């Protein structure tokens, strides 16, 4: 109790230094919580876009399709695989894929046709939720299509516009048909934004004269199943086909996400290291200023452990206050960033590694993130305190009292 | 109070050599000194005669190069650092030239600090320290911090701290060096009274003639040895 009382008073003994030290710690915590929340929000949104809008957790293709995509290489019995996956609690939806040319009015552009079964597709991806203009595909409108954002812009097309599609059928014929644009998507990814034309699977099959099979099955794993485990399960259910996780399909993006997460940790450490040096300096000054005092304390019988504890308590008090202030300042800003976000619409859907940034950049603040920022701060401060505290604890009273 | 025969402190053939750069400094060269319970002893001598070194050894703040320092029969050099720390807390009181109070503690808290270290309850600390402060004439200043006290008042708090835990001996290093002569006389009166009324054993290291005048035994050190030992009636 005496040590705690002394520590509290010692903190306020040099008010300016203590306030500067605490303000630095609070500022570092504030910066780190907000910075990591924003980065986590950015990475989370990017990963969600990849997993929920574009790729899914895993994909199944016919052997060799990914290396050389062509309309002829199909998964022979996609329905059986989809049924087997559904039975195991996985989401699964077949997709039909083909390149072509789209024209609307005087404009034309290269397109990527994506034939889907909307009700199955909704179990694995959330593209339907991203319709910006018009509506999503519906079985009652077999000639309706939904376009990617930039494709619609370059074709000058919108809901109600006509789209002529030219492609090559699997029978070698020139395939062409007239479709009506039902909707235009919000930004999703570079590939989808620039070229995607979503249409119903039957319309795709009619156009390309493809009676059976699917080019791709997108798989969504149950949340409690780890990606490698899911990959093993799906591989077992699709023998002879090529099963890949999203990390294998988009390795550059996966690496970038990992690198960004690592960069976050490095910046974390750099900022905190700077704070650690500041704290070390402050504690060292506090110790050197009081060498004689520690000598007297030890002379009257205060043990080394108590001296050590006193200094640790002084830093603990400052750290606790700094954490309280840092959180008090970070939480409202974090709440704003998580709910309102930063409008980056001016960037016009800039994409990073093929994944488009949303117009609103939302932060993601979890207890774990805030907890990590606090724990790292505490660890760094402890590291910076131990040496001076140890030094003070080891002082010989006879030397310390002679110290000037 | 008369000097009793039982020695509280014994220094037997004590030497203490310091290394100062390339030179060995022999601060004590075979010092023999025995201080009995209830003594009021002044240790005098020129600078460098070994007074402060002897006091540091007697106070378990330092260990001898050779010889033995016995406090109530315990060889201080044989103790581990934490044991010496406990001996200092429980059996030795210190009064320093520069008062050396803890600046963030009030006069009462400073005086009671050794009791607090011993784990004495706050109520008992109050019961034991407040009468002491009253006896030293600073009861009304108990709540003040050291920087709100005069030099003499601070030294009285230091005296209260030194004797609050009823130590076997109080070691006072130039206790009157930083105060004016009137205050010095008052402090000496207070310490003499504590010695005579409460049997507190004092060993001073001093240059001050006023201390010598009050002392009932004067030990003169010269070149790290006892040169003269004068016990007064």
Image: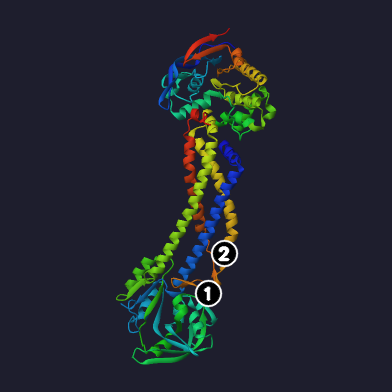
Q: Where is residue B145 in the image (x, y as percent from the top left)?
A: 64, 33
- Relative to A37, does residue A215 appear above or below in the rendering? below
Which residue is tagged 1? A348
In this view, the residue in front, A79 or B78, is B78
Q: In this view, does B225 lie to the left or right of B173?
A: left
Name the front one of labels 1 and 2. 1
Q: Where is residue A86 in the image (x, y as percent from the top left)?
A: 40, 75
Please give the chain letter of the residue carrying mark 2: A
- Relative to A372, does residue B201 appear above or below in the rendering? above
In this view, the residue in front, A232 or A318, is A318
- Residue at the location (45% across, 83% down)? A197
Q: Position of residue A255 (x, y in %)?
A: 40, 65
Please give the chain letter of the residue carrying mark 1: A
Q: Do labels 1 and 2 share a chain?
A: yes
Q: In this view, does B187 lie to the left or right of A195?
A: right
In this view, the residue in front, B77 or A201, is B77
Mark 1 residue crowding within 10 angstroms, few (<14) / some (14–19) / many (20+): few
Which residue is tagged 2? A337
Residue A224 visible in the displayed image: no
């Amino acid at each position: 109790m005496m040590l705690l009382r002394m520590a509290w008073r010692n903190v306020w003994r040099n008010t300016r230094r203590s306030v500067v030290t605490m303000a630095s710690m609070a500022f570092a915590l504030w910066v780190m919580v907000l910075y990591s929340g924003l980065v986590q929000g950015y990475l989370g949104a990017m990963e969600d876009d990849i997993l929920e809008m574009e790729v899914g957790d895993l994909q199944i293709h016919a052997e060799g399709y990914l290396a050389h995509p062509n309309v002829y290489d199909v998964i022979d019995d996609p329905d059986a695989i989809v049924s087997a996956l559904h039975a195991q609690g996985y989401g699964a939806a077949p997709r039909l894929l083909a390149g072509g040319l789209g024209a609307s009015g005087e404009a034309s552009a290269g397109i990527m046709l994506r034939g889907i079964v909307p009700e199955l597709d909704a179990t694995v991806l959330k593209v339907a939720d991203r319709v910006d203009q018009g509506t999503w595909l519906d079985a009652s409108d077999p000639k309706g299509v939904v376009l990617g954002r930039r494709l619609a812009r370059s074709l000058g097309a919108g809901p109600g516009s006509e789209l002529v599609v030219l492609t090559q059928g699997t029978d070698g014929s020139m395939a062409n048909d007239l479709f009506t644009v039902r909707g235009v998507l919000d930004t999703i990814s570079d590939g989808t934004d620039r070229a995607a034309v979503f249409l119903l699977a039957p319309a795709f099959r009619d156009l390309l004269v493809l009676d059976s099979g699917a080019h791709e099955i997108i798989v969504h794993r149950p949340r409690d199943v780890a990606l490698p485990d899911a990959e093993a399960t799906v591989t077992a259910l699709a023998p002879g086909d090529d099963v890949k996780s999203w990390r294998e399909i988009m390795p550059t993006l996966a690496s970038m996400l990992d690198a960004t997460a690592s960069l976050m940790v490095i910046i974390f450490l750099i900022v905190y290291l700077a704070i650690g040096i500041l704290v070390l300096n402050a504690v060292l000054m506090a110790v050197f200023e009081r060498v004689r005092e520690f000598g007297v304390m030890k002379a009257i019988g205060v043990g080394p452990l108590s001296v050590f504890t006193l200094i640790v308590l002084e830093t603990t008090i400052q750290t606790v206050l700094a954490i309280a202030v840092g959180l008090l300042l970070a939480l409202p800003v974090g709440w704003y960033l998580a709910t309102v976000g930063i409008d980056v619409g001016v960037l016009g859907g800039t994409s990073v590694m093929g994944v488009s940034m949303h117009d609103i950049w939302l932060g993601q603040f979890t207890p774990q993130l805030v907890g990590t920022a606090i724990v790292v701060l505490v660890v760094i401060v402890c590291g910076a305190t131990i040496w001076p505290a140890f030094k003070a604890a080891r002082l010989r009273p006879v030397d310390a009292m002679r110290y000037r | 109070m008369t000097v009793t025969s039982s020695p509280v402190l014994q220094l037997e053939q004590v030497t203490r050599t310091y290394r100062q750069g390339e030179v060995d400094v022999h601060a004590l060269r075979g010092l023999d000194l025995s201080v009995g319970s209830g003594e009021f002893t002044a240790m005098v001598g020129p600078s460098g005669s070994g007074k402060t070194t002897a006091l540091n050894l007697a106070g378990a703040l330092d260990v001898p190069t050779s010889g033995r320092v016995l406090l109530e029969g315990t060889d201080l050099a044989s103790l581990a650092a934490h044991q010496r720390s406990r001996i200092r807390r429980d059996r030795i009181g210190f009064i320093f030239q520069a008062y050396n109070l803890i600046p963030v503690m009030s006069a009462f808290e400073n005086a009671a600090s050794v009791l607090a270290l011993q784990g004495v309850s706050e109520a008992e600390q109050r019961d034991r320290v407040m009468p002491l402060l009253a006896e030293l004439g600073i009861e009304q200043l108990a709540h003040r911090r050291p920087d709100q006290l005069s030099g003499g008042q601070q030294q009285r708090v230091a005296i209260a701290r030194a004797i609050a835990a009823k130590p076997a001996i109080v070691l006072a290093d130039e206790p009157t060096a930083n105060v004016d002569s009137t205050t010095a006389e008052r402090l000496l009166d207070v310490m003499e009274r504590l010695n005579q009324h409460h049997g507190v054993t004092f060993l001073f290291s001093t240059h001050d003639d006023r201390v010598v005048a009050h002392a009932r035994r004067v030990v003169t050190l010269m070149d790290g040895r006892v040169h003269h030992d004068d016990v007064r009636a």
